[in-house]
Image (cartoon, grey):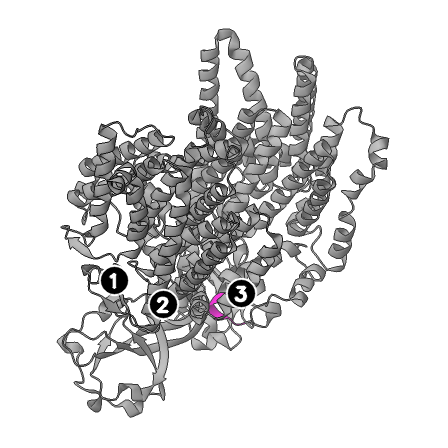
Amino acid sequence: MKLFRFVFDNILFILTLFLLAFIPLYPKLPLIDIQHTWVYIRAEDFFVLLALSVWLALLIRKKITLKNPLILPILAFWIIGALATIHGLFLIFPNLTGVHTNVAFLSYLRRIEYISLFFVAFSSVRDKRILSFVVGILTFTLLSVAAYGFGQKYLGFKAYLTMNEEFAKGVGVQLSSMSRIPSTFGGHYDLAAYLVLIIPLLVSVSFGIKNWFYRLLILGSCALGFVLLLMTVSRVSFVVLIAALLLVLILYNKRFVIALFFVVVLLFFSFSPGLLQRFGNTLKQTDVMVSAQTGEVVGNAMFVPRAYLNDKIVNQKFAESKGELTVVTDKDKKYATSSAFDIASLSSTIPLVVEPNAPTGESLPQGTGYINIFLSPIETRVGNFFYQQAKKDNATQSAVLFVHGDYLIKKSIAYDLSFTTRFQGEWPQAIKAFQRNILVGSGYSSVGLAVDNNYLRILAEVGLLGFVAFFGIFLMFGIYVKRVYSNIDSPFVKSFIIGVECGIFGLFLNAIFIDVFEASKIAYLLWLLIGITVGLVHKYQKETIDLFDQAKKIIISTPAIVLYLFIITGIMFSGMANYFFVGDDFTWLRWVADCGGSGANCHLSLSTATSYFTNANGFFYRPGTKLYFLLMYSGFWFNQTVYHLVSILLHASVVVLVFLIAKKILKSKLLSMLTALLFVFSSGYGEAVFWVSSVGFLFNAFFTLLALLLFIIWREQKKIIFFVFSFACITFSLLFHELGIVAPLFVVFYIYIYEANFSLLAAIKNKFYFLLFLPLIPYLFFRLISDSHWFSGDYSFNIIKLPYNIIGNLIGYLGLIGIGPIFLPIYGILRNFLREHLSVATILALIIFLGAVFIYRKYKKKISTDEQKIVLFSVLFFITALLPFLGLGNITSRYSYLASIGLELLFAFFIKKLYMHLLVNGRNIAIVVTIFAVCIFSFLQLIQLQKVDGDWHAAGNKSIAFFTSLDSYYENTWRKEPTQFYFVDVPIRLGEAWIFPVGLPDAVWFVTRNGKIQVYQTSSIDKAIAIAHDPLLYKNIFIFQGDGDVKSVIKTNALQIYVK
């Protein structure tokens, strides 16, 4: 009877412990089939249903309550999920194929099922002492999972997989010695995610246990789990687990253990050849067969001995595309067997492309995942190759096609299958589903069973509202734990809480590449552990906590705004990630791909880095930018996406720095955020972000602003470390662009404006202020001895016209930043007129100057001293950022990047003054009119920014068309022999985007890989012919077409010219 009473009183706790063990240990064997999917109802679903039924019965009997800290955010997430799926059923699913209403409904129920275990676990915590049983079950389960995994590796234990439709039927599979170990899970990724969650938890718990036997037992089980993780050969989970464990050690301040930890990890890693190989195969160099006419990839190419064709069926075919290879007609069949084919007439080695079978996940797929095939070097041109077709069902052998056509073999780098599948298949489909309705997505089951990015999956299925609601649950969880944590007096309980949070941190990282929150075993365990954690914390709660008030404070906090700015900037500029290289990009890339004109890649070495500081070869002195391209090329080759992502990251970082500096200047979080948003929306500086070559401006702006911010913080807190880093940032700014030479001036003007009782003499004597200018001395010295570019050509100053250029450029940049690129045509007309009428320009300049003085005197007394400081700092910031460019003969978009910040500060200030002026009409009217003014300005900028974005996209496409068309004329002699090329009507720019202002010779080099080539650019075919002289070179005269293609010009007689 006592036993029955104990069970009855603790039924939820017993069920919780049972589920903690049963769910990870019992294989995913199917019980009930579901139509239209190969996801089954399994035993775990019935046990979960049993636990929920018991919980519901206790709730009805009022033995437990619904009241808990996470009830409202959980219900909000469920409601949004329901609305999203209903919306999808009626408005989206009818236009899609492969989606089914029953699957959508069951997918929604599955999400409820996962999270509902939180309520069971929360209600099961009736006493703090239950934690020992929970830790015991987790340790026992981890040991059991590890034991079964070792059994699969060494004893032939069966694996029950769910990674495809056949495996999911529940048939046990005996793994090969090279297979990845899934243990009791449906796949190795699920097992790896489980270990990422459990190992940090138990390692943390070990620090809260005093008994050394239990501590060693737990750590031993974690060590076995770590070895098991190596057997999964999961690169992502391995890195994530290291990060999660490192977080555990940092939170416990275990400095010595951290050092020892890295040594142990390296030892484990070195004894895992499978994982080493997986990391090594992430990027793989391969030969690729490409159509010379279209640039279409046929597949991976290899050269094999001609004896490979012995005893094979050989057919002949003419084909110009991969699609034509899949159809073999009767007229294509020339030879029934290779015995009738004259193999002896072939070269000793023959080019072969093998049609891929269904991918297994272990090998590189053919035809996908190649990095920038357009810039990949051409190995040779071939008129024929052999295509090994995949063996058909019931066939004794596969046929070989002898394909005739026009093809190139290129040396390329490709991602392995897992990354290729994500980048080219799953992620784009999820993004497409999200874009159908960004608020509520497309509904559950609108994307495939695997997206391999849980964040994209949530956005695709339930949109932004669902995304916010889902992670709002974790936000509330974190707030609640933080508020009560100080009340907890048990080191054991604290260690468990820290472990759960570190495990969740690991899952958050894992979710970037794995659908961890949707994997059933992981999701069940996650919500059980969160429920237990909240239940334990609840026992220590001493006062009522308003979680929503706390959440509100967090949502509008400075860190939250920083996160919002990163997200907004990333979303706004994410479209540029795949835009192709143009113009100067090829010059920068050639410096690292053609080291010293040798044709060999530059290697990352001390001598190479030193040469960038000591030898500029007549170019601008930008060693930091050169090092950046060397690092990027060494790590990511020609992957333009990564180059653009770095630019987006730098731009977002600059946006954040604008916000943080604006907070110091404007003393208002709202106005500071407005300043940052206006800077993001600005269309005038687009060139600096969209053009890969302009990355030096982004680095320069980042370091300049960071130097200013750190100096302000040093001035406030007087901690020398901030000054040291400010000094370092000024130094770094000089390495990426000449604009860095004015970086100390921003600090000087800040001191001048905001220093109380400022004295010039005292400032000069201040050693700290003097030190800020110290980096200029070695910078100018190295710039002088490195044969760098100074003042010549387009970058020279005309002393006589200098005053006119300064005034004209100031007006131009004011218009470009304030109005946008639509101002440039008007500015161009005005500048051309005034250039021819200097007397008019002089009078106009005088009028502008007198007008500025009048406005200053009139309004000076109407604004406070603090407001005067804001205006003065903004104006000086704007002018200082343009100092190196004001004397030039024209204005350029990218030069306005840093200067834009000054005007955005000023605009935000005027918005505030507008609001204050309108208050006489009532607060509501003032707010609405102010918002209207901001919207109008933002709309003006955004529509221009969208056009600029489209221009750079189109310019990149023209660049691609150039490479594809020039490849089609490729001759094998181009690689070795001295060759001249002549290009007519070279496109310079398209709208606000550059195409080939310079860099065409470097772009041609990437096709030929020949340092002996000469490239000439002319305005007409006749001029090109006159320069060429030799009729044999007429075939190397190319004329650009409207879409960026080039066509070869053939002169057949003195009077006729034909475009080929």
Q: The disc labelled 1 sits on which kind of residue?
A: Tyr
Labels 2, 1: front one: 2
Between 696 and 180, which is closer to the camera in this rendering? Answer: 180
Give coordinates of residue 753: x percent, y percent: 73, 27
Q: Residues within 10 Å of mark 2 (few under 14, many from 20)?
A: some
Labels 3, 2: front one: 2
- Horizontally, is 920 left or right of 30 in the view? right
- Kindly identify the residue that appears in the image at 30 percent across and 92 percent down: 344
Give coordinates of residue 988: x percent, y percent: 50, 51
Mark-to-mark CA distance, 2 and 1: 15 Å
Please give the residue where the numbered disc 1 appears in the rendered image.
160
Between 492 and 601, which is closer to the camera in this rendering? Answer: 492
Q: Residues within 10 Å of mark 1 (few under 14, many from 20)?
A: many
**Numbered range of the magenta stretch:** 1005-1010
Predominant secondary structure in magenta?
A: helix
Q: Residues within 10 Å of mark 3 (few under 14, many from 20)?
A: few
Q: Is residue 646 visible?
A: yes
In terms of sequence position, does the residue under pointer 3 or pointer 2 come before the other? 2
- Kindly identify the residue that appears in the image at 38 percent across and 47 percent down: 133
Q: Against 305, is 201 above or below?
A: above
Give coordinates of residue 89: x percent, y percent: 19, 38
Please give the residue where the numbered disc 2 appears in the rendered image.
150
Give SS at disc 1.
Answer: loop
Q: Is residue 631 visible?
A: no
Please give the residue where the numbered disc 3 appears in the rendered image.
266
Give SS at disc 2.
Answer: helix
Kindly identify which numbered label has been placed on residue 662: none
Give coordinates of residue 731: x percent, y percent: 70, 48
Query: Looking at the rendering, in which quadrant would you find the N terminus?
Result: top left
